[in-house]
């Protein structure tokens, strides 16, 4: 297997609807990313819905 390490990326979602898609696309484009974790905390915008749509892609 070698010395390969995977990185976990955590993205907070509190009222970040405008920025989520760009953040997810940027993070998922990195070769070292093993998992992408989006953490919602009661956003009042569409952050949760948009993150659910992005997870289906």
Image (cartoon, rainbow, N blue to C red):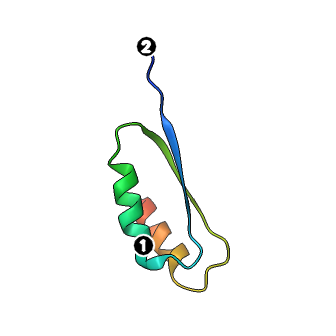
Expressed as whole percent of the image width and height from the top left, the position of residue 14 reads: 59, 74
Q: Secondary structure at mark 1?
A: helix
Crowding at mark 2 (Cα within 10 Å: few <14, some 14-19, many 20+): few
Q: Is residue 35 above or below residue 41?
A: above
| Quadrant of the image occupied by residue 44 | bottom right
Residue beneath the point at 67% across and 77% down:
42
Q: Are marks 2 and 1 in contact (CB under 8 Å)?
A: no
Q: In which quadrant will I find the C terminus? A: bottom left
Residue that mark 2 sits on? 2
Q: Earlier in the sequence, mark 2 or mark 1?
A: 2
Expressed as whole percent of the image width and height from the top left, the position of residue 25 reads: 34, 58
- Which residue is most to the right? 42
Expressed as whole percent of the image width and height from the top left, the position of residue 45 reads: 54, 85
CA–CA distance in space, label 2 to label 1: 35 Å
Expressed as whole percent of the image width and height from the top left, the position of residue 28 reads: 37, 50
Residue beneath the point at 61% across and 80% down:
43
In the displayed structure, does residue 39 sit left or right of residue 51? right
| Quadrant of the image occupied by residue 56 | bottom left
Q: Secondary structure at mark 2?
A: loop
- Which residue is most to the top? 2
Residue beneath the point at 41% across and 59% down:
24
Q: In which quadrant will I find the N terminus? A: top left
Residue that mark 1 sits on? 19
């Amino acid at each position: 297997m070698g010395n390969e390490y995977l990185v976990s990326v955590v993205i907070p979602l509190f009222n970040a609807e405008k920025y989520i898609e760009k953040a997810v696309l940027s993070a998922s484009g990195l070769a070292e990313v093993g998992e992408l974790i989006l953490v919602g905390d009661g956003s009042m915008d569409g952050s949760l819905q948009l993150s659910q749509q992005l997870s289906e892609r």
